[in-house]
Amino acid sequence: MSSSLTVSRRTVVAVFAAAVLGLGGGVAASAAPLSGAAEPQASPGEPWKRTELYFGATKPGGGEVSDAEFTAFSDKVVTPAFPDGFTELAGRGQWRGSDGVITREKSRLIIVVYPFGDRDANREIEEIRSAYKEAFSQESVLRTDSVEKVSF
């Protein structure tokens, strides 16, 4: 995303990030047992990092990144970076570009969870973002990061 974003866009992104973090942070609310309820058991797992990447599909000058193009990109770039797995979701969204125009478009969301000790993850995530922007002439790929409790 461009560094010339408006304050209102930053506010929207901050509120979104807070909402995402808030959804994963129900620990405090569940710490005290309800009246008459049994003592809650701690859920299994350990803290891991979670990163979500939002990929817009509209190409500058018209057209969209096709399912086949995104699959090829994922196979070539995402899978080698995170061979242990990730989740891909299809969606629709909108955002305001640096030109001030609101774009509604198909999108893809990739979610990866990885241990805190994965020293390569941040570099790999940034390489995925850069590769997508270059391959499909995109202005940005939104990234959100949070901490989740993970159990397999």
Image (tube, grey):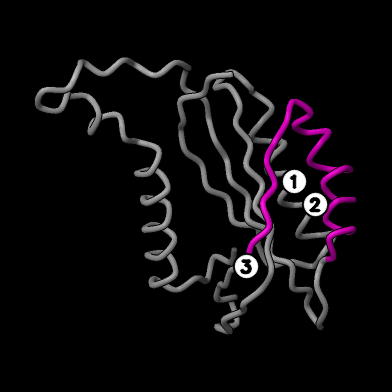
**111 over 96 or under it: above or below:** above
Question: Residue 92, which numbered label?
Answer: 3
**89 over 50 or under it: above or below:** below
Q: How many numbered marks have been drawn onto this rendered protein structure?
A: 3
Q: How far apart are marks 1 and 2 (CA)?
A: 5 Å
Task: Write down the quadrant of residue 85 in the picture.
Answer: top right
**123 over 152 or under it: above or below:** below
Q: How far across and down, in percent of the image, does residue 138 sit?
A: 73, 66
Q: Is residue 78 left or right of residue 118?
A: right
Residue to which mark 2 is pinned:
131
| Residue 70 falls inside the magenta stretch | yes
User: Quick check: marks 3 and 1 in contact, CB under 8 Å?
Assistant: no
Q: How far across and down, in percent of the image, does residue 65 sit?
A: 82, 66
Image quarter in which the C terminus is found: top right
Density class for disc 3 (Cα within 10 Å; few <14, some 14-19, many ≥20) is few
Q: How far apart are marks 3 and 1 (CA)?
A: 20 Å
Density class for disc 2 (Cα within 10 Å; few <14, some 14-19, many ≥20) is some
Residue to which mark 1 is pinned:
128
Q: Which region of the structure is painted magenta?
A: 66-91
Residue lying at 68% horizontally and 63% vertically, measured from the top left? 107
Q: Which residue lies furthest to the front in this view?
A: 36
User: Quick check: marks 1 and 2 in contact, CB under 8 Å?
Assistant: yes
Image quarter in which the N terminus is found: bottom right
